Image (cartoon, grey):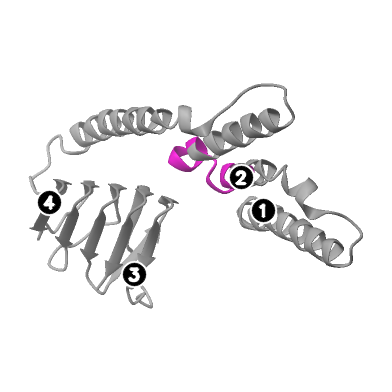
Amino acid sequence: MDTKYSSIIAPRLILGIGIILMGTLFLLGNMDLIDPQEYFHFWPAFLILIGIAYIIQCRHGSGLVWGIVLIFIGTAMLLHRLHFIYFSVWSYWPVLLIIFGIMMIMKASTRWRNTKVSTFGATDANSYIKAIAIMGGFRRSNSSQEFKGGELTAIMGGLEIDLRDASIKGEAVIDIFTMMGGVEMRVPDDWVVVIEGFPFMGGYEDKTRPPKVSAKRLVIKGVAFMGGVEIKN
């Protein structure tokens, strides 16, 4: 219980301290006691705080990766402003593409191994759903009564997934990756949706009506980079 609450409180505590410091600088500047511009020169320290918050909150998966990336960028920019090293974000932006590629390969290999083990001896060949939309649209429905999850990718495109006729025995996990794209998913009324995905300049939106009692859990994981994921009934 303590670990659960600390993972929620710690990011808010860190970001709250950063906001308080920013407000204090503005206030002292309006009172002509200091020049806020001299202190805002070190704004990359805020990226470090955000990275720390993500690591504390996520502790694994894509959230941990992006937390480390933000800490690295913030530290490099701060050292650059202190004249210790030379660093330009625009010179290293392709690193983001490399990170995305590595994450997709790791997720694909992990998902392939898990699917191979989980589907051995299974009677429902449609228990997993996979779909990719690149600069286009894709619609797919699934009515498996032993739905296990799947993998969805939308890059500058959109996916519409209809699972209202499907059923879960226990828990299913869907790994979603969006890059300047979106995923819209419809699920049954008796499913509990748990979002564990990481939004990076994007977002996850759960519009489902939570059932009062249900043993069917749909866990949403992955990364929404400049894109969105919407789940509704």
At horizontal 52% and vertical 34% (from top left) the residue drawn is: 69
Q: Which of the two residues, 39 or 217, is positioned nearer the viewer here?
A: 39
Mark 3 vs mark 1: in front: 1
- Residue 90 in picture, x, y percent from top left: 47, 33
Disc 2 + disc 4, Cβ < 8 Å: no
Secondary-structure class at tag 2:
helix
- Give the amino acid type for the residue marked by disc 3 in the picture: Ser
CA distance for labels 2 and 1: 9 Å
- Residue 201 in picture, x, y percent from top left: 43, 52
- Residue 156 in picture, x, y percent from top left: 22, 49
Name the residue tied to disc 3.
214
- Give the amino acid type for the residue marked by disc 2 in the picture: Ile
Disc 2 + disc 1, Cβ < 8 Å: yes
Name the residue tied to disc 1.
6
Q: Upstream in the sequence, badge 4 or badge 3? A: 4
Say the numbered circle drawn on residue 56: 2
Q: Which of the two residues, 98 or 94, is positioned nearer the viewer here?
A: 94
193 vs 189: above or below: above
- Give the amino acid type for the residue marked by disc 1 in the picture: Ser
CA distance for labels 3 and 1: 27 Å
Secondary-structure class at tag 4:
loop
At horizontal 30% and vertical 64% (from top left) the residue drawn is: 230
Mark 4 vs mark 3: in front: 4
Q: Is residue 232 magenta?
A: no
Q: Is residue 53 magenta?
A: yes
Name the residue tied to disc 4.
136
Q: Which of the two residues, 143 or 81, is positioned nearer the viewer here?
A: 81
Of all residues, the one furthest to the right in this rendering is 33
